[in-house]
Amino acid sequence: MEQWMLDRRAGLGDTVLEGARTIESLCALAARCEDLPGVHAAAVLLPSSGGQLSAVGSSAAEAGTGELFALMAEEGPGVDCLRRGQPVDCEDLSTAEGQWPRFAPAALARGFAAAHAMPMWPWGQQIGIVNLLRGSTGPLPADVERAARGFCQVTAFTIRDARRSYRLNRSGAEPARAIGSPVLVGQAAGVLAERHQISMSEALNRLLAYAGRYDQPISEAAALAVSGSPDFR
């Protein structure tokens, strides 16, 4: 497990060194977490300036999971994690229907039995929440939690560097055009995933392909996707 974790942290580190875009890094984080033993789905939630959460880095194991992730941004362990500033663990979702009357039944209906949320806390500032969904009840194994935290730490540096680049280039330079708004891009990918019943990774690929084909900033392509035009097939 230790070597496995180191290999995947190195992969995320490569993303940082290459200056990859924030949304791609978040999708990579979710994908790495989904590879962890016993984890069936993962999503990264980012808080907006108003404190609301948006699912911007989910990697859906099945078509339709993005709808659950969108609901998770409204209630569930991720929301509670943001409010408390500490990890939230639900070892048995069947006992949480009173606490999360919409999220818990929806997660159970999709075959998930346990949910866990942990904050990303670089530099004393919470910049995101990582959510893990599991198919069996019980506590999150210590080695799985440790690996997920390691992934979070590496990805946090990616987000920091991307935000710095965006601030430095917001006058219109190419790096700023490439990064776009992580929240908007994530929302657009979620819309495409639900509309066409595809994975978040495939939805992101379609956004990037469209932006490249028409030489548009990714944020403009995302806005078009959210508005319903064009089709992005």
Image (cartoon, grey):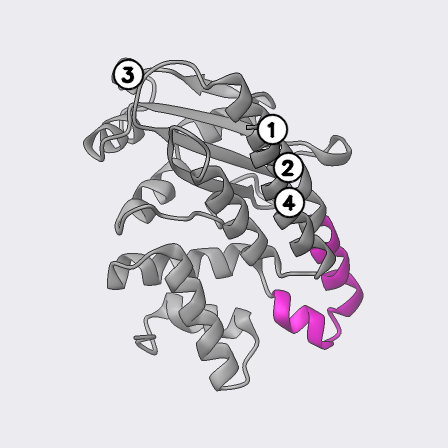
Residue highlighted by disc 1: 2
Which amino acid type corresponds to the residue marked 1 in the rendered image?
Glu
Which amino acid type corresponds to the residue marked 2 in the rendered image?
Leu
Where 77 falls versus 48 (above or below)? above
In this rendering, position of residue 230 left or right of residue 12? left
Nearer the observer: mark 4 or 1; the answer is: 1
Q: Earlier in the sequence, mark 3 or mark 4?
A: 3
Say which residue appears at 52% left-offset and 35% top-offset: 130
Which amino acid type corresponds to the residue marked 4 in the rendered image?
Thr
Q: Earlier in the sequence, mark 3 or mark 2?
A: 2
In this rendering, position of residue 92 left or right of residue 15? left
Image quarter where the C terminus lies is bottom left
Image quarter where the N terminus lies is top right
Q: Which label is found at residue 78? A: none
Say which residue appears at 30% left-offset and 27% top-offset: 135
Label 3 crowd bin: few (<14), some (14–19), many (20+), radius 10 Å = few
Label 2 crowd bin: few (<14), some (14–19), many (20+), radius 10 Å = some
Residue placed most toward the observer, 227 or 124: 124
Determine whether the residue tagged by mark 1 lies in a helix, strand or loop.
helix
Residue highlighted by disc 3: 98
Residue stretch in magenta: 159-179
The furthest residue to the bottom = 214
The furthest residue to the right = 168
Contact between marks 1 and 3 (CB within 8 A): the answer is no
User: Which quadrant of the structure image shows residue 122?
Assistant: top right
Determine whether the residue tagged by mark 4 lies in a helix, strand or loop.
helix
